[in-house]
Image (cartoon, grey):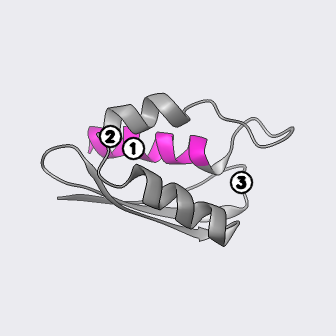
Amino acid sequence: MKTIQYETTGTCSQFIYVEVDDDDRVQNVRFVGGCHGNLQGIGALVRGMKREDVINKLKGIRCGHKPTSCPDQLSHALEKIARN
């Protein structure tokens, strides 16, 4: 199991805790800060998905006028966990 605490930038959430299993599937996502209900929903939706599939779906999503979003930051966290 790989685990990461990712410090977000440009979003209301401050951190994302992510766990990916040995089969490269997302097992747990927990955001600190941000829109609690929406972020719980994102975590539930991606649970069990392949890491690369989550990245492909979420990367580049923007929040209003911001250049990033919580889903986009999750894709960055998942890219980083692969490098560790």
Q: Which residue corresponds to mark 1?
A: 78
Spatial CA distance of label 3 from label 2 is 21 Å
Q: Which residues are magenta?
A: 71-84
In terms of secondary structure, where does tag 3 sit?
Answer: loop
In terms of secondary structure, where does tag 2 sit?
Answer: helix
Q: Residues within 10 Å of mark 1 (few under 14, many from 20)?
A: many
Q: Quadrant of the C terminus?
A: top left
Looking at the image, which residue is at 54% across and 36% down? 58
Looking at the image, which residue is at 12% across and 49% down? 22
Spatial CA distance of label 2 from label 1 is 7 Å
Q: Quadrant of the N terminus?
A: bottom left
Amino acid marked by disc 3: Thr
Q: Which residue corresponds to mark 3?
A: 11
Q: Is residue 6 visible?
A: no
Looking at the image, which residue is at 54% across and 66% down? 40
For marks 3 and 2, the one nearer the N-term is 3
Amino acid marked by disc 1: Leu
Give the quadrant of residue 31.
bottom right
Q: Position of residue 12 (x, y in %)?
A: 73, 61
Residue situated in front as seen by the camera: 16 or 24: 24
Q: Position of residue 20 (x, y in %)?
A: 26, 53
For marks 1 and 3, the one nearer the N-term is 3
Compared to residue 19, the image places residue 61 above or below, namely above
Q: Which residue corresponds to mark 2?
A: 51
Q: Is residue 34 visible?
A: yes
